[in-house]
Amino acid sequence: SGTLDKCHVIGNSSGNYGGGVSGCTIQNSVVCGNRAGTTTSSYGGGGHKCTAFKTVFCCNTAPKQYGGGVNGGVLVDCTVSNNVAGYYGGGCCNTVATNCLIIGNSTTGENFPAGGGGAAGGTYYNCTNVANTSYYSGGGFFGYRAGVTTRAIKCTIRDNEDLSAYGGGGA
């Protein structure tokens, strides 16, 4: 653990967890173009179990499983954009987010089912979830399995898309 401030974390990779950052506090930074998962599992292409303030997570990937942008952790005043997950949570998975923009993320369906283009699992307060795409269900938000809840409180959910016949373009 540690703190990153005003950093650019770009083009890194890990075998499984947090292609860009893992287990740290990050603020006023950019986490972009990172990848988690080179074998059968991947968690948090950009970040895994981090606390982030005013940070951009963009163009990261978790091709095998969860959270293309972020898996776990806490986000405040962050932007999560254009990230990809193979399974659940193209932008965020199992994350607590406040005042965040979650935009243009997707799930690929590489590991069917693949839901929650914007987010799967976690709690989202006053977030804007827009223009995300899901291969399976819940283009914007998706509660991806029994015992895991996705809560959206005072959020704007707009222009998301589910590409399957299962429904739930927004949630």
Image: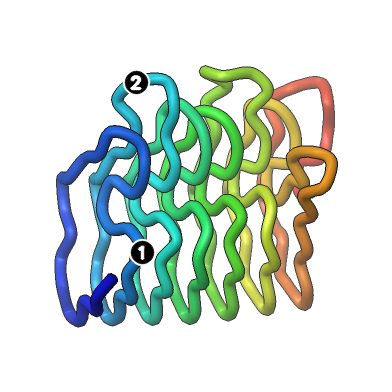
Under circle 1, the secondary element is: loop
Q: Is residue 135 left or right of residue 104?
A: right
Query: Which amino acid type corresponds to the residue marked 2 in the rendered image?
Result: Thr
Q: Is residue 78 left or right of residue 142?
A: left
- Point out the image quarter for the N terminus: bottom left
Q: How many marks?
A: 2
- Residue 76 screen position, x and y as percent: 49, 80
The relative height of residue 99 versus residue 95 in the rendered view (above or below) is below
Q: Is residue 97 left or right of residue 55?
A: right
Secondary element type, mark 2: loop
Label 1: how many Cα within 10 Å (few below 14, some 14–19, many 20+): some
- Label 2 with label 1: CB-CB less than 8 Å: no
Vertical order, 112 against 131 (above or below): above
Looking at marks 2 and 1 on the same chain, the residue that comes earlier in the sequence is marked by 1
Q: Residue at x 66, y 42 (%)?
A: 116
Q: How is the image coloured?
A: rainbow
Q: Residues within 10 Å of mark 2 (few under 14, many from 20)?
A: few
Q: Which corner quadrant of the image does residue 58 belong to?
A: bottom left
Q: Nearer the viewer, residue 28 or 139?
A: 28
Q: Residue at x 55, y 33 (%)?
A: 107
Q: Quadrant of residue 6?
A: bottom left
Which residue corresponds to mark 1? Answer: 23
Tell me the kind of residue under disc 1. Answer: Gly
Q: Residue at x 69, y 52 (%)?
A: 121
Q: Nearer the viewer, residue 88 or 165?
A: 88
Check disc 2 and report the residue beneath it: 39
